[in-house]
C-alpha cells in the first residue's frame, strides 16, 4: 500500500487536509464503537520501531521493509470491523514475526575459556537465524577485572551469511593470573544501541609471566615505601623542633 504510510499525530496536525471537518455529532455510534482502540495503534507503532531496528542489520532491507509495512497497514484496515478476533490474530502474527526475526540474531552462550599468556583471542559465536545476510552489527566485550584482563578491540564488526553461525574472535590482553568475568553483547553499528541479550562467561587467565605480576606488586611496594619514608621524615622534623615553652 504505497499510497498509505503511517504518520505520527504531531506530523498530521502540522499539515492538515484542506477543507472543513465534518460535524463529529453526525458520526454513527455503531461505527464509532468499531474504531481501532488506542492499544491497537500503540501495538502497531511498536511494530514500526521493531521494523526500523531489524532493517539496521539486514544486507538488503528493502524487500523486508516493504512486505512488513504492507502487513502493518493491512492490520489497521477497516475491513476487519466485522471480525475483531481475526484482526487481533493477524496483528499478533505480524508482531511475532518481527520479534522472532530480531531474536534470531543472538549470541550463543559459552562456558569457561582459558587465556594462556599475555595476549590471546577469545572466540564468540553469533547465530544468524535470518533468511538474509547479516550486516550492521558489532560485538563488544567488557571485563569485570580490567586490571587482570581487558579487551584490546573495543568493537568487532560481524558479518554472517543467512541461516548460519559465525565465530568472531576478540583480542584480549592479560596482566595477571586468575578468573575474570567477561560480558559480550551485540550492538547496531549505525547508532551503537544494544541488540538482544548479553552473555557472560569466565576467562581463566594462566601462565602470565611472573615479571608482569612482580612489576605490579613492585609498584605497589614502592608507593608504600615512599609513604613510610615521608612519614618518618615528618616525625623526625617534629621531634627536633625547639620547645615553644622554653
Image: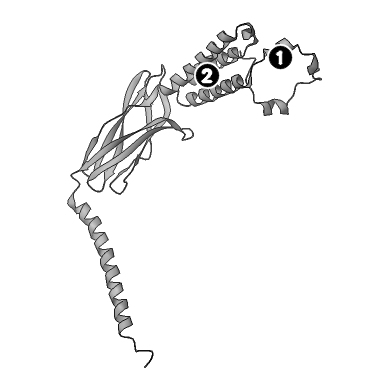
User: Is residue 162 shown above or below 118?
Assistant: above
Tell me the residue at 28%/47% (across/down): 148
- Locate residue 41: give its quadrant: top right
- Counting from the top left corner in percent of width and height, residue 90 is at 54, 11
Per the image, label 1 sits on a secondary structure element best described as helix
Left or right for 175, reference 153: left
Left or right for 2, reference 68: right
Image quarter (top left, top right, bottom left or bottom right) of the N terminus: top right
- Counting from the top left corner in percent of width and height, residue 239 is at 30, 83
Q: Could you tell me if residue 174 is visible in this image?
A: yes
Viewer-side label of 1, 2: 1
Mark 1 vs 2: CB contact within 8 A: no
Pick whichever, 36 or 115, lies toward us.
Answer: 36
Image quarter (top left, top right, bottom left or bottom right) of the C terminus: bottom left
Tell me the residue at 30%/40% (across/down): 181
- Locate residue 128: give its quadrant: top left
- Counting from the top left corner in percent of width and height, residue 177 is at 22, 46
Residue at mark 2: 65
Q: Upstream in the sequence, badge 1 or badge 2?
A: 1
Residue at mark 1: 32
Per the image, label 2 sits on a secondary structure element best described as helix
Left or right for 84, reference 203: right
- Mark 2 crowdedness (10 Å alpha carbons): few <14, some 14-19, many ≥20: some
Residue 120's tag is none
Amino acid at each position: 500500500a504505497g499510497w498509505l504510510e503511517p504518520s505520527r499525530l504531531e506530523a498530521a496536525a502540522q499539515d492538515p487536509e484542506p477543507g472543513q471537518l465534518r460535524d463529529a455529532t453526525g458520526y454513527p455510534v455503531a461505527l464509532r464503537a468499531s474504531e481501532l482502540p488506542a492499544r491497537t495503534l500503540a501495538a502497531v507503532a511498536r511494530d514500526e520501531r521493531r521494523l526500523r531496528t531489524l532493517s539496521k542489520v539486514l544486507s538488503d532491507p528493502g524487500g523486508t521493509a516493504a512486505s512488513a509495512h504492507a502487513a502493518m497497514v493491512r492490520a489497521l484496515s477497516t475491513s476487519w470491523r466485522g471480525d475483531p478476533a481475526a484482526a487481533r490474530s493477524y496483528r499478533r502474527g505480524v508482531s511475532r514475526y518481527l520479534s522472532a526475526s530480531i531474536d534470531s540474531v543472538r549470541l550463543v552462550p559459552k562456558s569457561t575459556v582459558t587465556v594462556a599468556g599475555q595476549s590471546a583471542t577469545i572466540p564468540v559465536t553469533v547465530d544468524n537465524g535470518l533468511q538474509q545476510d547479516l550486516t550492521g552489527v558489532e560485538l563488544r566485550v567488557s571485563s569485570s577485572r580490567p586490571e587482570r584482563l581487558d579487551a584490546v578491540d573495543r568493537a568487532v564488526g560481524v558479518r554472517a551469511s543467512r541461516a548460519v553461525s559465525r565465530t568472531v574472535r576478540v583480542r584480549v590482553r592479560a596482566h595477571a593470573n586468575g578468573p575474570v568475568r567477561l560480558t559480550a553483547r551485540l550492538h547496531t553499528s549505525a547508532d551503537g544501541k544494544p541488540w538482544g541479550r548479553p552473555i557472560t562467561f569466565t576467562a581463566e587467565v594462566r601462565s602470565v609471566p611472573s615479571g608482569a605480576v612482580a612489576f605490579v606488586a613492585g609498584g605497589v611496594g614502592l608507593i608504600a615505601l615512599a609513604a613510610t619514608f615521608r612519614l618518618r621524615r615528618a616525625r623526625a622534623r617534629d621531634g627536633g623542633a625547639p620547645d615553644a615553652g622554653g
